[in-house]
Amino acid sequence: MNRYHAEILEEAIERFDRTLWKADLLLTALFRERHVGKRDRAIIGDLFFTYIRSRYLVERFIYEGMTRADAVARAHETTDAPSELLHSFPRMYYTAAEKRYGDGALTVLAWLNGRAPTTIRVNCRRAPRDEVKKQLAAESIRAVPTPVAPHGLIVVSGESQLTKTTLYEKGFFELQDDSSQISVSLVPADANALLDLCAGGGGKSLALAAERSHLAITASDIRVGRFAEIRRRAERAGTPITVLTPERLTGKQFDVVLVDAPCSGSGVLRRNPEDRWRIGEKELTDLRASQRDCLETAYRLTASGGAIVYLTCSYLPSENEEQVAAFCAAHPDLVLEKEPRMLTAPGGTADLMFGVVVRKHP
């Protein structure tokens, strides 16, 4: 690492420790301010994420007398350190992993400390998966089918060109991890009107709209700034989706309410490794309160006989089984359709996703 890289890396780490910004946003802003070139961005970014993923190991090297930049560089080359240092997670994440995965907890955390593949969902209204795979190959983008999602492709090479292709511009595919793709299969097949209550950018609404042409989908979110993105993506995909602000949902009811709840993101730490340092016990308490608020809103908007589909990208029981148990205890008319469960297992291509369906009986 040269002095220039060390200087920018030090500034990135100092900003992160002080502000706990999302890592990609922090780096983008810093690189723009300092006019960092493409090659240097790749080197510094790689080292910065080494700090994020192996923070305890870096701190050990600093304790032994290294400068922070040198400690990060050494951690970047180290593969034989104790797991709790090499794969650095606060105690909250260890405890939850031990509770769910027992003796396999350290293996799970090591996997979560890796990097997730780039995955896309083929829009089956536009073309079958094999055809999109073939057309991507013609543009030097190599992809292989995901082992879990029927419309998913894992991009092996050429991912930086994905959103520049004509296929993307014409809505033949969307970037979406395969755990999110398979999670929508929990929506009951007999649903006719669905509300995506925490829609975000609309990824799950788009996946449902592509597969179920008969399903009337309404997307909503308290983050109304995301609505333009939902509308743009729906138009590109040729999949109609109604978008409503939360206040316009008053008095409406739906066959199914999908709650992709705000959560710790502990199941997607391969994609957002910095969240382990951003979300601690206090933040988790606030998130659990938000989850409960979302579930109560979903309850009011679910018609008699309808279903609530609750999802998180978390492996923490307090956000999942414990949250669902408390919710059902408060509403005796709710019945579990199936036992709450993790929809995906660690070690594969898919991120960790939890899901459950509860039915609102008359």
Image (cartoon, grey):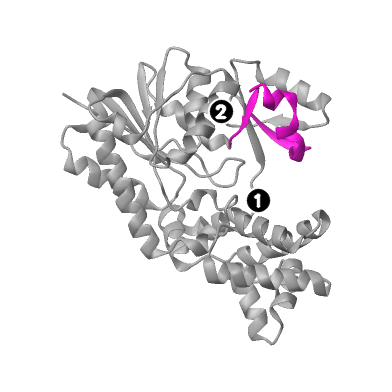
Any magenta on residue 155?
yes
**Residue 194 lies in what quarter of the image?**
top left
The quarter of the rendered structure image containing the C terminus is top left
Residue shown at 74% from the left, 32% from the top: 164
156 relative to 205 in the view: left or right:
right
- Quick check: 145 above or below 240? below
Q: Secondary structure at mark 1?
A: loop
Residue shown at 29% from the left, 27% from the top: 307
Amino acid type for the residue under numbered disc 2: Arg
Within 10 Å of disc 1 (Cα), the crowding (few <14, some 14-19, many 20+) is some
Q: Earlier in the sequence, mark 2 or mark 1?
A: 1
- Quick check: 99 above or below 211? below
Amino acid type for the residue under numbered disc 1: Arg
Mark 2 sits on what residue?
232
316 relative to 87 in the view: left or right:
left
315 or 62, nearer to the observer: 62
The stretch of residues the image draws in magenta is 152-176
Location of residue 106 in the rendering, given as x and y in whole percent from the top left corner: 54, 60
Location of residue 95 in the rendering, given as x and y in whole percent from the top left corner: 43, 63
Any magenta on residue 245?
no
**Residue 73 lies in what quarter of the image?**
bottom right
Mark 1 sits on what residue?
115
